Amino acid sequence: MKKLLSIALLLLLICTTSFADELQEKAVEYIGEVAFGNKDSSVDMDTAVLKRIHGSIHISLQGNVTSKDMTFIDALLYNMDRKTNIDVSLEYDYYKANVVIYYGDAEFHKKYVRNYREGESFYWYYWDDFSNIYHADIAVLDSLDQETRNANVVRLLFRSIGMSYLSSGTKSSVLNKEMQNLTKPSDLDWKALELIYSKNAHAGMTYEAFKKAISENMN
């Protein structure tokens, strides 16, 4: 009986390891699309580099924030911390935040979000000479129903911290071009974010350098 149990546990371990390796390989390929833009014809992959926030992510909520918005953000950040090991938290002091999510109408967003496109939820970020994102603003229209508000927050948050390009073929991803109402990041989304913020990656890396760094860590 003990022998059979040991064999079963070994098989489970092999299957789990195989799944994790496969997910990581898919995530690295996916990162090429959503973080480096390798499927965007306007992007020069010889010069495209990784952009991400250096250090902890501190998020401030401003404007017409409801209790349902707060509940959703709390759950999202809890999962981000648990699934990616990113140090992320809500910051109640606006001046200490490096990501600010604004809830309001178009007139409100025009005051606070650079290059705001009227009638849309929108994001804009700033980066330094080393491709470190040091501040991001996210505009969410408060006229939207709650599910759409939440979907916009997830999508724009992922885009504003490093996964800037939309995906053309990954249906389960919150960055899918066609599926704009997804509120729960997929395992692939979380794994991609984890790798982008891993100790083996850093802002300013080319995609080839990123792939090499991640591959060396796998071996």
Image (cartoon, rainbow, N blue to C red):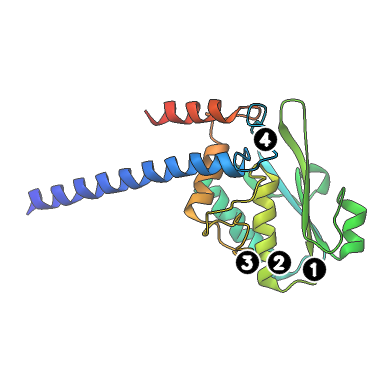
- Along the polypeptide, which appears first: circle 1 or circle 2? 1
Q: Which amino acid does label 3 sit on?
A: Asn
Q: Residue type at mark 2: give it.
A: Arg
Q: Kindly tell me whether residue 148 is visible in this rendering.
A: yes
The residue carrying mark 4 is: 51
Q: Position of residue 110 (x, y in %)?
A: 91, 56
Which of pointers 1 and 3 lies earlier in the amino acid sequence?
1
- Could you say which disc has been placed on residue 142 in the image? 1
- Tell me where residue 136 appears, x and y as whole percent: 77, 45
Specify the quadrant that holds the C terminus.
top left
Tell me the residue at 92%/62% (across/down): 107
Residue 64 location (% of width, % of height): 82, 66
Q: Position of residue 15 (x, y in %)?
A: 27, 48
Mark 1–mark 2 Cα distance, whole angstroms, equals 7 Å
Residue identified by numbered label 3? 181
Whichever of labels 2 and 3 marks the residue nearer the N terminus, that label is 2
Question: On the picture, is 118 further left or further right than 210?
Answer: right
Side of 177 where 12 appears, left or right = left
Label 4 to label 1, Cα distance in Å? 29 Å
Q: Do the residues labelled 4 and 3 touch (CB within 8 Å)?
A: no
Residue 85 visible somewhere in the drawing: no
Marks 2 and 3: CB-CB under 8 Å? no
Q: How far apart are marks 2 and 4 (CA)?
A: 25 Å
Residue for point 60% across, 39% down: 38
Picture quarter with the N terminus: bottom left
Q: Mark 2 points at which residue?
A: 149
The answer to which of marks 4 and 1 sits earlier in the sequence is: 4
**Amino acid at pointer 1:** Asp
Vertical comparison of 62 with 6: above or below: below
